[in-house]
Image (tube, grey):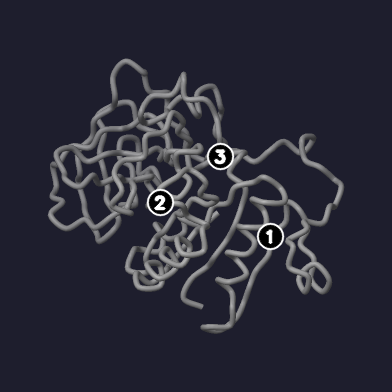
């Protein structure tokens, strides 16, 4: 299969933005990360600045003089248009981090400065994202202007506590009779749809989005991972035609996160739930 399609509820990702900076480092404030290599906390008054020391395809090594950022923090390359975000994947020694570029590294040279954003990659969330298409770093790619939202959320979140999880199994009524009868979906679980081209996977997905909105009052996120550009464009216009996306009003039922197949595997993985 050329892509993976998944739906999940976005309500658990919403959090107020009153205490969040544009890079939302406060998302992880006070939370202790359980990684093998942990750095000292970075002061909120001054962002750490490093410099590129090696570029190997999508892998970029960045050196810091002090305040080594923790793993999964996002770095932004200075003076580059469009923005280039690097995600820290590994610590190399005491002052060097290995990062994965979220876009092409053409033109990136040794010595360029990178700024630690103080937190993980953050994307806009909330009702303003409905009907919009974003990439993995939260930038709109549907040519409809910026997403004016009051809430931001990190793409890396802690799992819920075991005590907060429900042990009851409840069937999710999809409204599709053959699914509810022969292969019912369990709330909170994961479902995979496997099939060749043109067998109706997209039709089922859009029907689920509609039914979840009408019967359960919920919203959905469509993640197109490894999607062909042509397929993504066709799907977007099909959602507009069927009313899943409303360009003129505010009754859209879905947000889309798309990473096309020419992107590196790490970027495509970040775009999946």
* Residue in the foreground of this view, choosing between 186 and 161: 186
Query: Left of 67 or right of it: where is 160?
Result: right
How many angstroms separate mark 1 from mark 2 (CA)?
Answer: 30 Å
Residue bearing mark 2: 247
Counting residues from the N terminus, which is met first, the one under dot 2 or under dot 3? 3
The vertical placement of 112 against 58, above or below, is: above
Q: Residue at point 37% right, 29% down?
A: 118
Task: Name the residue located 40 percent from the left edge and 46 percent from the top edge.
Answer: 90
**Residue 43: image location, x then y, percent:** 36, 18
Instruction: Work out whether mark 1 precedes mark 2 in sequence or the reverse, and give the earlier one.
Output: 1
Q: Nearer the viewer, mark 2 or mark 3?
A: 2
Could you say where residue 6 lies in the image, as x and y percent from the top left?
Answer: 57, 61
Q: Which quadrant is the C terminus positioned in?
A: bottom right
Q: Kindly identify which residue carries mark 3.
A: 157
First in sequence, mark 1 or 3: give its number.
3
Q: Residue furthest front?
A: 248
Q: Give me the C-alpha separation between circle 1 and circle 3.
A: 18 Å
Q: Residue at x 37, y 31 (%)?
A: 23
Single out the mark in the foreground, 1 or 3. 1
Q: What residue sits right under mark 1 in the picture?
A: 190
- The Cα atoms of the two marked residues, 2 and 3, are separated by 31 Å
Badge 1 density bin: few <14, some 14–19, many ≥20, Cα 10 Å:
few
């Amino acid at each position: 299969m050329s892509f993976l399609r998944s739906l999940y509820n976005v309500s658990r990702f919403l959090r107020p933005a009153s205490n969040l900076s544009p890079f939302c480092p406060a998302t992880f404030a006070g939370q202790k990360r359980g990684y093998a290599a942990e750095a000292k906390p970075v002061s909120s008054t001054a962002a750490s600045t490093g410099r590129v020391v090696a570029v190997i395809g999508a892998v970029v090594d960045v050196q810091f003089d002090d305040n080594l950022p923790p793993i999964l923090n996002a770095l932004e390359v200075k003076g580059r248009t469009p923005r280039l975000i690097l995600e820290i994947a590994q610590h190399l020694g005491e002052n060097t981090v290995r990062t994965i570029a979220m876009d092409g590294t053409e033109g990136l040279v040794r010595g360029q400065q990178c700024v630690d954003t103080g937190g993980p990659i953050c994307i806009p969330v909330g009702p303003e994202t409905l009907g919009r298409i974003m990439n993995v770093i939260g930038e709109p790619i549907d040519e409809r202007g910026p997403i004016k939202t009051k809430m931001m959320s990190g793409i890396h979140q802690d799992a819920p506590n075991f005590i907060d999880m429900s042990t009851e199994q409840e069937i999710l009524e999809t409204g599709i009779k053959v699914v509810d009868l022969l292969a019912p979906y369990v709330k909170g679980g994961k479902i995979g749809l496997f099939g060749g081209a043109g067998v109706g996977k997209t039709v089922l997905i859009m029907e689920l989005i509609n039914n979840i909105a009408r019967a359960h009052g919920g919203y959905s996120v469509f993640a197109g991972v490894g999607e062909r550009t042509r397929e993504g464009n066709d799907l977007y216009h099909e959602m507009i035609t069927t009313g899943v996306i409303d360009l003129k009003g505010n009754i859209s039922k879905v947000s889309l996160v798309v990473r096309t197949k020419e992107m590196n595997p790490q970027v495509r993985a970040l775009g999946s739930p």
